[in-house]
Image (cartoon, coloured by chain):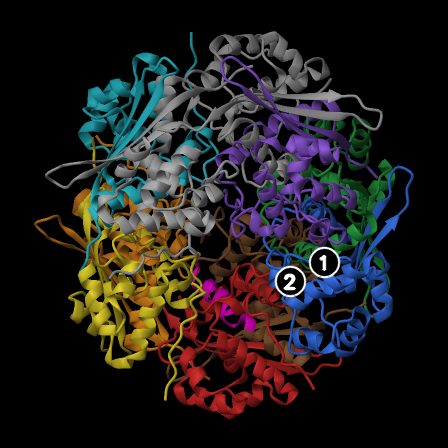
Chain colours: A yellow, B orange, D cyan, E purple, G red, H brown, I blue, J green
Amino acid sequence: MSQALKINSSSEPYSDLPQICTRLLEAKAQKGQCLSFEAIGKAIDHDEVWVAALFYGQAKATPEELAKLGELLDIPANNLQAELGEHWFPRRGLGPVPPQDPLIYRLFEGVLVYGTPIKALIHEKFGDGIMSMIDCKVSVDRKENPKGDRVVLTFDGKFLPYLKW
Amino acid sequence: MSQALKINSSSEPYSDLPQICTRLLEAKAQKGQCLSFEAIGKAIDHDEVWVAALFYGQAKATPEELAKLGELLDIPANNLQAELGEHWFPRRGLGPVPPQDPLIYRLFEGVLVYGTPIKALIHEKFGDGIMSMIDCKVSVDRKENPKGDRVVLTFDGKFLPYLKW
Amino acid sequence: MSQALKINSSSEPYSDLPQICTRLLEAKAQKGQCLSFEAIGKAIDHDEVWVAALFYGQAKATPEELAKLGELLDIPANNLQAELGEHWFPRRGLGPVPPQDPLIYRLFEGVLVYGTPIKALIHEKFGDGIMSMIDCKVSVDRKENPKGDRVVLTFDGKFLPYLKW
Amino acid sequence: MSQALKINSSSEPYSDLPQICTRLLEAKAQKGQCLSFEAIGKAIDHDEVWVAALFYGQAKATPEELAKLGELLDIPANNLQAELGEHWFPRRGLGPVPPQDPLIYRLFEGVLVYGTPIKALIHEKFGDGIMSMIDCKVSVDRKENPKGDRVVLTFDGKFLPYLKW
Amino acid sequence: MSQALKINSSSEPYSDLPQICTRLLEAKAQKGQCLSFEAIGKAIDHDEVWVAALFYGQAKATPEELAKLGELLDIPANNLQAELGEHWFPRRGLGPVPPQDPLIYRLFEGVLVYGTPIKALIHEKFGDGIMSMIDCKVSVDRKENPKGDRVVLTFDGKFLPYLKW
Amino acid sequence: MSQALKINSSSEPYSDLPQICTRLLEAKAQKGQCLSFEAIGKAIDHDEVWVAALFYGQAKATPEELAKLGELLDIPANNLQAELGEHWFPRRGLGPVPPQDPLIYRLFEGVLVYGTPIKALIHEKFGDGIMSMIDCKVSVDRKENPKGDRVVLTFDGKFLPYLKW
Amino acid sequence: MSQALKINSSSEPYSDLPQICTRLLEAKAQKGQCLSFEAIGKAIDHDEVWVAALFYGQAKATPEELAKLGELLDIPANNLQAELGEHWFPRRGLGPVPPQDPLIYRLFEGVLVYGTPIKALIHEKFGDGIMSMIDCKVSVDRKENPKGDRVVLTFDGKFLPYLKW
Amino acid sequence: MSQALKINSSSEPYSDLPQICTRLLEAKAQKGQCLSFEAIGKAIDHDEVWVAALFYGQAKATPEELAKLGELLDIPANNLQAELGEHWFPRRGLGPVPPQDPLIYRLFEGVLVYGTPIKALIHEKFGDGIMSMIDCKVSVDRKENPKGDRVVLTFDGKFLPYLKW
Amino acid sequence: MSQALKINSSSEPYSDLPQICTRLLEAKAQKGQCLSFEAIGKAIDHDEVWVAALFYGQAKATPEELAKLGELLDIPANNLQAELGEHWFPRRGLGPVPPQDPLIYRLFEGVLVYGTPIKALIHEKFGDGIMSMIDCKVSVDRKENPKGDRVVLTFDGKFLPYLKW
Amino acid sequence: MSQALKINSSSEPYSDLPQICTRLLEAKAQKGQCLSFEAIGKAIDHDEVWVAALFYGQAKATPEELAKLGELLDIPANNLQAELGEHWFPRRGLGPVPPQDPLIYRLFEGVLVYGTPIKALIHEKFGDGIMSMIDCKVSVDRKENPKGDRVVLTFDGKFLPYLKW
């Protein structure tokens, strides 16, 4: 008989999050591969990236969403409400930067290397402004490729022109 | 009669680059809107983001590409070769981080907020490894939207599994 | 029956504050939307921003104010006095900077982008000196707007001219 | 007869800006108190804070605005176009943080001390999201007060709710 | 009946100090305003600033001084000896710098703004050397003033000339 | 015949200041010991520390003061006005911190070691607030002492209570 | 009879790792010199460096490998699965950099001193790209030498050319 | 006819080195692919990595080696002696860390990820001590591989046991 | 009857060390002045500085040395072996730098001020290389002096010439 | 005929020093091995380390010492006075820390590894206080040793007890 899975909740990034986040991740892990973020997303009508953001304390759910989530993962809705309810607001962030984790560092390197070219292109196509990271959808897809499958990471964010007043 | 456009080559990010980069950008600017990065890309058979990366010293062109570029922008190929030729290698990078520029900061914030969720999803879909930022295509597109057009920024990078030995 | 709400008191910004601060916030949350900072402010004769500052350990209340607060939130005044009484003094601050939280970062970006222009204008209108952040009122208002409501954040601080001696 | 005014363009914050910014500030200074940012603002139909932002390289003007500015300050429009024209985009920012300048530090301290309370209030009044620093008007006013005049600094920014997808 | 006063000993600056420091401060607070640092200083024959330094773990007392202190504050001398006795040596310091606390930051700003002028004057009056911060008395006085009372902070330190050998 | 004295104006702290500051210091040095900061102070009716602050770009003089200064040091008033006139505002500061210079470091260490005790005493004597570093006089005196003369450094600043609103 | 060996699991680098890592290292230590990383490697068909990486939470094992490891070290496989199973993913990294530990610092110094020369040689031999640290084998060998044995540290990583698109 | 090749000597890493280093690299580049570091190494009896280290100011040559080098690259030996002679000593180093350049970052990541495992293995095989980075040979080889050629980077350094005294 | 002496093991530098280090220091303190580091050194045949390094987790003892130490200090040898035995290796280091402790800062300042001159002299006397900090003896002596006793701190380290290969 | 030796005066540590320092070092180098720091020291009655400190801008000479130095090195005394005379005061320091230069880093590592043990021993032998780095002699000696000569680096500094007041 298997033992309950554990996450080291005293280390980054878990130590900065409500403890219930660790419990959410453990409950998901307990269900194994049959419960992917995609599957959870379908159950609560959200994209898998948004769900993962929620599990890592980077997004905020409604009471209804928490209720569905509790049902799906066998966690009392009360517990979820107690820690992630209306009164809670995410302090979004990553911990020390630059990140040392190689996967996350590669994303960071994407900003280091392509940040200025991306800025130049947005400026050329839209004018003076930014891509919103608030009104923004993120997706992570697997694209098959005979030379090795590829990760397709997309940020789809609203352009916000600088206000002139 | 108009005066030659200038870029403050003693400030970031220009000060770290070969001076010819500044000249490339000034030459492009001189031609105005009829010479977008996309147009240059078509002329040298590359995507516009790669071209912008080249102009900001983040990529490396072949002698043939430099020759075409010189012709397009009325810069002697010799000058381009002298600074961006075989002997040159890009020291890719951005300058001080976190970036203060709001547009580039938003990209950085994308890593801060979504870095761990993206990692969790790549792990779930591919296993232990990373998305390559070397074997990676970047694109920046404008998507029309009645509520405000959107920037679609995509990283399409090869998944690299961790070697076990 | 609902469970007591919880705040992760071992994470920033709670870990640096007297534990009673966490309890104040949980008690407020328990009362739900009927007990806004504004409502608490009315009960203890202070502005809502000052009240929020007090709850986050950035301001100091008198014994009378603590007593009223205890009554309002069903916390024994003794407990409040024990941690936030005369002997306590706030170590005001935010934690690591730059802040990663997107909302707080935007305020920080306001300083990055508009700091020098604001300095130039204060200099032009008042001469050599500063705006006091000690003798300063802060307000946060919601202004309706058909294109999307707006936050109006105001700092109203005394001008202090540099002493010449 | 007076000598042309000078600004130390090799020091912060001038060294990071197009040199024309220094010239703009010197030209304004040359005209003395009769040419305040407010007066310039009226001439080019913008608020004084936006004008100051432009002079410090934090905002972007149209060719028409540059033309009016050149006329007002006796700077050939060509020169302004050459450095601040379409091809230029501001790299907004302040230089090293925390800022050491006492006036700017006070603004920064405003974020340190009141950042979390402001976040709590915006959350209470608007829900999960941020105040835009892009679609944001900034004003600096002098308010008379018998105990010492006050600076009223206002940020009026659009609330942006977090997208859920 | 009042509850024992508490200090959050897991936060800065208390977390770096022997726990008995927290107890000293709580004991002092318990006695209220009748037991100022000045009063304690008189009882153990030291200046109030030195006493405050001792309470915050920045100075070292003799066994006799600890004994007197224990008597005054109703703390068993054994407890004081156990943590602050001969075997203990202060690791003097403040925690992260720059300090965010506004009062301490102002002292720090005094060094930022007046550090070089002070150096120039010491050099002019004494020659090449420093003001000792080891053989140095610090005092904090309240000076009445109709426009608002003033803090008079004095460092009285021995000049140490650089040895030439 | 002696050569004109020189200061390395491309190094800290001179590189961040108007070049005229270097010239002021060189002119003062040229006059040798007969022209101390105290003597200059008497000539322009200010304390020697304020004068030193002015020479290091940390304070702002009126046109009249600049005129007197020019006369005293044989620098055309026009030159002083051109760089330090009305249009100029000091960006007060020190450069990288912690300072490595041993004299300035000792001042900094004074804040590290005595910062919290000083805070505790100000709080005890005045309540919740700060010592102003804007409405503050600084003095540096030499006190004779048979065991070695002492530096007496005094900050005399207005107490500012925190506004409650 | 000997006492169970202990590792200070609340300090770097152990505090960031799953607690089972500490237990793995203690179990290995308990067995003494007869159980080197090499011996463990043979038992689970991996190189000794990979095994050490696994013990320090820098690599990921399959369930089968964990099972073999549990058997070898008398740790129930369930415990290993609970903390290092499928749901776990390594957050690779070292902690604060630069490292202070002298052995690890020497590796870091290798990058400081030889990083640019190594880059130049890779560029010369392979063109524009990098050595993968993901598809990379690391080995540590002892080479006898009469003047003192030598450490031979090898990184054998795939060259990845920069994609041009 | 081709133009002399240029290196941007005002940017990292060239700005910290004697200017003759830039000239060495330009002279080598001028000769094209027929003059690899390996070829230069053969001419002056050193390994190619050591030669690259010399060209990047990280190693020190004898007068004889400089003479041979001058001959090979058509640079007067006097010039080499004037900047890299006996009186010169390398200030070895890389510039800001962590390095942003992706190739050098991968080396740095090797230390982040494998530093502790490497330490554990050296400790197991040699006892308490370090691998010398002073008495250390570095090599960079290309190893053919049908799946993509590999970089083999080796550090061969003397083990130094900690002295006990 | 006296109480057991205590050290605040949750603060720097104790928190990073095996807990037995704290116990060693407390046991030594319990014995008072009759048990100096020198006395312990004699008992285990090592210099006092090496002993102090051992007590602060910066050096590594053999089982025999631990046994003698246990006997001397009444700590079961098993306990010492369990935490400081063969399986343990020191992670040498100091914690955050620059150090704020005034005594340790002075050592650090010695490197800041005299580092380059020392380098120049070692280069002049030995050529290109370093002083080993691994094969190095450190001593701390008290030298009597009528003007005030002096600390004589000596580093006696092997010169290591840079390998050329 | 040989060319004048050159030092890259735009790089660290030279860029922060008066230019005359570079000239001093070049003049010394020109004379070759017959003019060691020791020889210069004899000529001006100072120890070689102090002389090296003077050449690197870390110490201050009298006019007489400058005159002797000028004679010895064929530099007009006027030039030395102009830059290093009475009006000049050293800004002692090293530049960015931690130092990357391997020789200087080893000194720094000496503080990291042995700083706390040294503190413990000074405390044990002298009580609460510091070793002065102002009233301190530094020496660097070569000690012959058949296993490899050794560097003996000594700091001989006055003990300063903490003042209690």
Q: What kind of residue is marked 1?
A: Leu
* Coordinates of residue E42 in the picture (x, y in percent): 71, 31
Q: Which residue is mark 1?
A: I5
Residue at position x 65%, y 70% in the image: H136
Q: What kind of residue is marked 2?
A: Lys
* Coordinates of residue A129 in the picture (x, y in percent): 23, 43
Residue D16 placement, left or right of I72: left
Q: Crowding near pointer 1: few (<14 within 10 Å), some, many (20+)?
A: many
Q: Quadrant of residue E59?
A: top right
Q: Mark 2, chain letter?
A: H
- Secondary-structure class at tag 1: loop
Q: Crowding near pointer 2: few (<14 within 10 Å), some, many (20+)?
A: some
Badge 2 vs badge 1, beta-carbon distance below 8 Å: no
Residue D113: in magenta span: no
Residue H68: which disc? 2
> In the depicted view, which residue is nearer to us: H97 or E46?
E46
> In the depicted view, which residue is nearer to us: I30 or D27?
I30
Q: Main secondary structure of the magenta part?
A: helix
> In the depicted view, which residue is nearer to us: A126 or J33?
A126
- Secondary-structure class at tag 2: helix
Residue H114: in magenta span: yes
Residue at position x 50%, y 45% in the image: E3
Residue E42 placement, left or right of B46: right
* Coordinates of residue G5 in the picture (x, y in percent): 63, 79
Q: Which residues make up the magenta segment? A: H101-116
| Image depth: mark 2 or mark 1 in front | 1
Q: Quadrant of residue E44?
A: top right
Distance (Cα) linking label 2 and label 1: 68 Å
* Picture layout, residue J36 above or below residue J87: below
Q: How many marks?
A: 2
The quadrant in which the C terminus of chain E is found is top right
